[in-house]
Image (cartoon, rainbow, N blue to C red):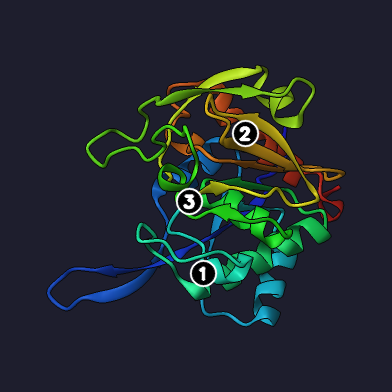
Amino acid sequence: MVTFRPLIGCTTYKKRVPQKRPIDIYGLMPSYTDAITAAGGIPLLIPLGLSDEDLQSIFDRLDGLLLPGGGDVAPDVYNGRRNVRMDGVDAERDRVELFMARAAVEEQKPFLAICRGIQVLNVALGGTLWEDVMSLVPGAMNHDLPDSMPRNHLAHTISIGAGTSIAHIMETTDSWVNSIHHQAIRDVAPDLLVTAVAPDGIIEAAEVTNHPFAIGVQWHPENLIADDPAMLKLFAGLVESGSRQPSRV
């Protein structure tokens, strides 16, 4: 039980708002911040466009970090190839999130990486991605939920490795999850341990070894916290781990 509310930094994306005079904003879906709040944390949005020095200053003040979903990671940063299905590539977002992911691993800062986030984490540590699962992975199912489907639609099961951190947190070794992605981990980074897979073998979760709380999931637990208590436990684990940071003890 936390006695204060840890500060959880959330990276953002740039989006054009179509209004009378269109403007660009930095934003994040409320489902992420709502999940952090429900778990007892305080979300803080991290804008793009900051220098590495300023990003480090923000990072130093955080108790934990969340890397959310979003557009595709540029293939240039992992020696990948362009694909016709790529969408939402933003070099500035890649720079900010790769910086934050590496800092969180190096400085043992608790973090949760979701969908794009687990892909960023893998790339940050030296791994690669499938640029498009359906066209490149033989026998793969469609992991990209249609826009017409609700974001809490349960698309498929996952198998979670017994004894892993995520199995301990969620208190299960199998679960139904939603699925809103077309890219996924290909070559696993050296410091990552695969902890869950889909029925077709696509990696659904991974964790950084020898780290207090460093979990990545390929699905969107923030959209499932009202349906499955185990999903909220992922955010509660992040917040609780953040409360144990050296500066908070």
Q: Secondary structure at mark 3?
A: loop
Q: Nearer the viewer, residue 126 or 16?
A: 126
Return the x and y of residue 197 as percentages of the image width and height. Answer: 60, 30
CA gap between label 2 and label 3 equals 15 Å
Q: Residue 105 at what x, y percent from top left? A: 78, 56
The residue under the point 40% across, 62% down is 27
User: In percent of the image, x 26 and y 76: which residue is there?
Assistant: 23
Q: Which residue is mark 2?
A: 234
Res 22 quadrant in image? bottom left
What amino acid is at disc 3?
Gly
Q: Is residue 218 visible?
A: yes
Q: Nearer the viewer, mark 2 or mark 1?
A: 1
Q: What amino acid type should be assigned to the residue bearing mark 1? A: Arg
Residue 101 is situated, as x and y percent measured from the top left of the image, at 68, 60
Under circle 1, the secondary element is helix
Name the residue rendered at 82%, 53% in the picture. 108
> In the rendered image, which residue does mark 3 sit on?
69
Image point (60%, 64%), residue name: 97
Q: Which residue is mark 1?
A: 93
Residue 200, compared with residue 192, is above or below; it is: above
**Quadrant of the image occupied by residue 150:** top left
- Number of numbered markers: 3
Question: What is the spatial separation of the Cα atoms under label 3 and label 1, in whole angstroms?
Answer: 12 Å
